[in-house]
Image (spheres, rainbow, N blue to C red):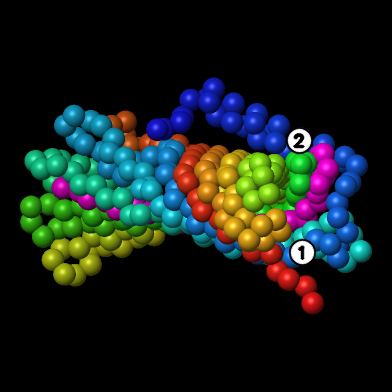
Amino acid sequence: MKIDSQETQRFIRNRLLMTISAAALVAMMPQHSARADERPSWMVFEVNYDRLGGDSQVWAQNLFPIENLTIRPDDGLSGTVGFVTPLQDSNVDVGMFARFGVSETNRANTAPPSSVYNVLGGATYTSYARGKVKHSEHHVIVDFEARRDVGFGSGNNGVTVTAKGGLRFGYFEANTDTTFSTPGSYQASENRKNRLLGLGPRLGIDAVAPLSDSVQVDFSAAGSLLLGDQHIRVTSSQTLGAPIVGQSTDELHTFRIVPMLEASAAVGFEPSGPGGTTISLGIRGEAWFGAFDQRTLFNPAAGAGSLGTSAANRYSVGPFIRVKVPLGRD
């Protein structure tokens, strides 16, 4: 479902600020962490199925009647690998988590008979008899964080809350490829690459509540800001038969601040008992605000102008499986 109302976006941004504030408050609470030699290092592996949503990319425009043709990313998969280890003589753990996500390629065509404009922005818009498009996205996120446990209750009967903070590196890319043709041999193609490269602060909290000796529930929430460069590159070419009769490239760089919000809930099982490997099943949701600039260069319906939004949002929700493996000490 597309979430595009200002009221809904304001609600989500408020939750982002509440998450950051809660993490800061937890970090200032008295510590009840185990000593470094009592806390094991551990690794985590996670696989997600992502249902993607958000704003659509306008890729063509019908002439009769005038209407925009749009496309969004299809569902995708993402995976995470992470490592955490305690600092010597400290109640702080440090870790790194790397995640890669990719969407399936979504495809669309204009239904004949049709007459469409190409509007991605690489070449002056021209009328064609037919158009087709494919769209895909992928991202890489790396988190460097420091973690500190704050215990509530005692022993296995207590809820453990971990405050975490650090730096997030993020790279997001969207690719839109279009091809337009006439009944003859004339054809035009446009490739649009939309990239965001950024770095910024991240704060969050994790909470684990045991239900029994081998079953637990855990919750996680975090907010971050990416500050960086948004780069758009549109390459166009026109062909008449085999030879290329025209080619052009247009680029745009913009500084962006992109808020990000994430949360998850899961049930974990420890097959070998407390302190062993944990297998968790859960659901995760994420939101990236203003990750892409999806404006087109031309708007045939109103002369020169643009369609689409300059701050396109992305939303992801879906199930995951996670395996957390403690690493033994000599």
Q: Residue at x 71, y 32 (%)?
A: 18
Q: Position of residue 147 (x, y in %)?
A: 78, 53
Majority secondary structure of the magenta segment?
strand
Region of the chain picked out in magenta, as a range: 130-155
Q: Nearer the viewer, residue 72 or 125?
A: 72
Q: Is residue 237 above or below residue 220?
A: below
Q: Is residue 308 above or below residue 274?
A: above
Q: Nearer the viewer, residue 168 or 319?
A: 319
Instruction: Report helix, strand or loop for mark 2.
Output: helix
Residue 191 seen in render: yes
Q: Amino acid at mark 1?
A: Pro
Q: Is residue 61 magenta?
A: no
Q: Position of residue 13 (x, y in %)?
A: 62, 32
Residue annotated with mark 2: 22
For residue 306, side relative to residue 21 (left or right): left
Numbered disc in front, either 2 or 1: 1
- Dot 2 surroundings within 10 Å: few (below 14), some, or many (20 or more)? some
Q: Quadrant of residue 25?
A: top right
Q: Is residue 148 magenta?
A: yes
Q: Residue at x 46, y 31 (%)?
A: 3
On-image quarter of the N terminus: top left
Residue annotated with mark 1: 40
